[in-house]
Image (cartoon, rainbow, N blue to C red):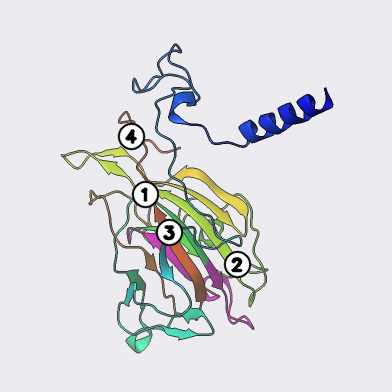
């Protein structure tokens, strides 16, 4: 009896640890059809998600990421005028000729995208408000989420770090002191336009600053314009990402993106953003 029970236990353990085969693929065929009309609830034939290998440490690039800056090369980027410096695994903005802006622009274009980057404001801090550690992430070179030294640095609410610049302040301000590395994790959804150029769905952003939610699928009013209400102008489905130079030596490291499959658009948008 003891030998029989032991053998049964081993058989159960082996079965429990074995992968499912085509013959015993889990799921159902007699369940209701989902609203999209493609699959049933718990459909046995529904394709499995693609396997992605996560990074060994938090913040690292997963296996399906496009690495834009690995601490060594800025080959994935082009400056507007003057090359940015690369030192100690960080890229630092360099003002353009005559003190003009000198953004860093990706050579590749993106639409819906997940982005991770880390940034550091200068230490010791110089100046104040918008002149202190100012930069920004511009999706499609049009839609900016602000980078600023937001630690004990009063400024207007829709211009501090974590803000959709000129539109929505961050939900909270989880800034670290200047000189410390900080992280952004952002999901950007591009706007959709009709054949006539009419806006069908706005751009959306979900953003975490230092692991804290600061924008919760917030719609954009339109493209970022200083001291004006943002407006939309029809454009293509993909465009470069831009890191702003605002005459402050902000440093960046560990920049990667994951192009995302576009969410099904609901084309009942009437132009009102709440």
Provide the residue designation for mark 3: 65
* Residue at far bottom of view: 98
Looking at the rendered image, the quarter that the N terminus falls into is top right
For the question of whether residue 248 can be seen, the reply is: no
**Residue 119 covered by magenta stretch:** yes
Relative placement, left or right, of 171 versus 109 is right
In the image, 93 versus 87, the foreground residue is 87
Q: Residue at x 33, y 58 (%)?
A: 142
Relative placement, left or right, of 107 versus 162 is left
Looking at the rendering, the stretch of residues picked out in magenta corresponds to: 118-141
Among the 4 quarters of the image, the one containing residue 256: bottom left
* Residue at far left of view: 196
Provide the residue designation for mark 2: 182
Kind of element beneath mark 3: loop
Looking at the image, is mark 2 or mark 3 earlier in the sequence?
3
On residue 174, which mark appears?
none
Looking at the image, is mark 1 or mark 4 earlier in the sequence?
1
Kind of element beneath mark 2: strand
For the question of whether residue 68 can be seen, the reply is: yes
Count up the numbered dots.
Answer: 4
Among the 4 quarters of the image, the one containing residue 173: bottom right
On residue 112, which mark appears?
1
Query: How far is mark 3 from mark 1, CA to CA?
Result: 13 Å
Q: Residue at x 29, y 64 (%)?
A: 108
Residue 212 x/y as whole percent? 63, 53
Looking at the image, is mark 3 or mark 1 earlier in the sequence?
3
Q: Nearer the viewer, mark 3 or mark 1?
A: 3
């Amino acid at each position: 009896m003891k030998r029989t029970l032991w053998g049964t236990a081993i058989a159960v353990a082996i079965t429990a640890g074995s992968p499912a085969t085509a013959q015993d693929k889990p799921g159902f065929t007699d369940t209701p059809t989902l609203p999209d009309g493609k699959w049933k609830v718990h459909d046995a034939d529904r394709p499995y998600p693609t396997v992605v290998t996560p990074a060994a440490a938090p913040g690292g690039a997963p296996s399906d990421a496009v690495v834009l800056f690995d601490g060594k090369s800025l080959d994935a980027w082009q400056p507007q005028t003057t090359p940015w410096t690369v030192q100690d695994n960080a890229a630092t903005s360099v003002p353009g000729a005559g003190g003009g802006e000198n953004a860093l622009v990706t050579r590749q274009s993106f639409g819906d995208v997940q982005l991770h980057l880390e940034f550091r404001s200068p230490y010791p801090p110089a100046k104040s408000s918008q002149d202190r550690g100012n930069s920004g992430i511009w999706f499609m070179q049009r839609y900016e989420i602000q980078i600023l030294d937001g630690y004990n640095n009063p400024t207007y609410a829709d211009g501090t770090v974590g803000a959709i610049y000129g539109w929505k302040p961050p939900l909270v301000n989880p800034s670290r002191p200047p000189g410390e590395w900080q992280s952004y994790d952002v999901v950007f959804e591009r706007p959709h336009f009709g054949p006539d150029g009419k806006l069908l769905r706005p751009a959306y952003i979900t953003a975490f600053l230092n692991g804290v939610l600061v924008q919760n699928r917030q719609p954009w009013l339109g493209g970022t314009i200083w001291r004006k209400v943002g407006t939309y102008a029809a454009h293509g489905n993909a465009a470069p990402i831009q890191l702003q130079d605002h005459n402050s030596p902000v440093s960046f490291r560990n920049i990667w993106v994951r192009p995302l499959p576009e969410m099904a658009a609901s084309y009942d948008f009437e132009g009102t953003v709440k």
